[in-house]
Amino acid sequence: MLYSATTAADKRARLRERLASGDTLLFPGAFNPLSARLIQDKGFDGVYISGAVLSADLGLPDIGLTTLTEVAGRSQQIARMTDLPALVDADTGFGEPMNVARTVQALEDAGVAGLHIEDQVNPKRCGHLDGKQVVDTGTAVKRIRAAADARRDPNLLIMARTDVRGVDGFDAAADRARALVDAGADAIFPEAMRDLAEFEAIASAVDVPVLANMTEFGKSELFTTEQLADAGVAIVIFPVSLLRLAMGAAERGLETIRREGSLTSELGNMQHRARLYELLDYEAYNHFDTGIFNFTVRTD
């Protein structure tokens, strides 16, 4: 009821344990707190909070327009709604190394279990768009060192994302990944890998967990979780998938209203009221106020 009873510290410790186990963890992207609860209900390992999704939810493109305050606020809303660890996209850290340090502590206070800082030039853009620019290795290293030094909970996962693959090629990406691990990164997010062999090579190049981004319509093929596990990937994210599914359904619904004048034909595609109330755990609130849940929900 209300928010998760699992503390942020416990979620972080649990994430560390799961990563140490060698399992491949699946983190679908939550586009709001309710979808985070659904992700937990379906038995996934964690929740991903995408910068692209947060931007889109505000009606903005993913080009570095969101602020630390917006990201931290949304992260808190999502992270507190689930017992699962939440991993958040912190873009470039919202500024220079001192800003990166503040970003880490703000997101730590928001209750996330981990975050990733990328090596793009600020303002950044979606990692699967052309025309990206990356900072030099020295600047990227300073960002990660600042992030690692700023955390107060040693279990907070500091992940380094590198976009070098799409700018200078794979070998440069592998070199950058090694430098970021040396700077203190607990995990590596190599963006826009071209094939499974590249994921496998990155996993072999560094002695930390590697993340694979399975975003639809991007540079990477949509490999199965089994294929990625065999390539040595530790975390698989599906950052925008639920938002795309939801918006696709919303478009179809609006078109149906225009075409048919009602949504009767779409009822079978909707989440039923009973299922929504189950997910929201209406009945648990009866413990505090019998006037809240004193009715029967129809399931037909």
Image: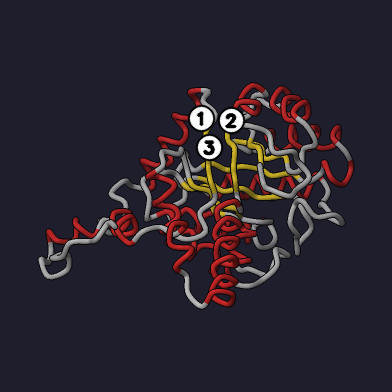
- Is the residue 117 above or below the residue 96 in the image? above
Distance (Cα) linking label 1 and label 3: 11 Å
Q: Name the residue under label 3.
A: 26
Closer mark to the observer between disc 1 and disc 3: 3
- The structure residue drawn at horizontal position 34% and vertical position 58%, both measured from the top left corner, is 276
Between disc 1 and disc 3, whose residue precedes?
1
- Contact, mark 2 vs mark 1 (Cβ under 8 Å): yes
Three-letter amino acid code at the position of disc 3 = Leu
Q: Tell me, yes or no, if residue 63 can be seen here.
A: yes
Three-letter amino acid code at the position of disc 2 = Ala
- The structure residue drawn at horizontal position 60% and vertical position 50%, both measured from the top left corner, is 239
Looking at the picture, tell me which residue is in the foreground, 150 or 279: 279
- Mark 1 closeness class: few <14, some 14–19, many ≥20 residues within 10 Å: some
Q: Tell me, yes or no, if residue 109 can be seen here.
A: no
Q: Name the residue under label 2.
A: 234
Looking at the picture, tell me which residue is in the foreground, 266 or 114: 266
Secondary structure under the numbered disc 3 in the rendered image: strand
- Res 290 quadrant in image: bottom left
Quadrant of the rendering where the C terminus is positioned: bottom left
- Res 159 quadrant in image: top right
Q: Name the residue under label 1.
A: 19
Between disc 3 and disc 2, whose residue precedes?
3
Distance (Cα) linking label 3 and label 2: 9 Å
Check residue 182 in the rendering and tell me which mark sits there, or answer none: none
- Residue 2 lies, in percent from the top left, at 28, 59
Left or right: 146, with 267 as reference point:
right
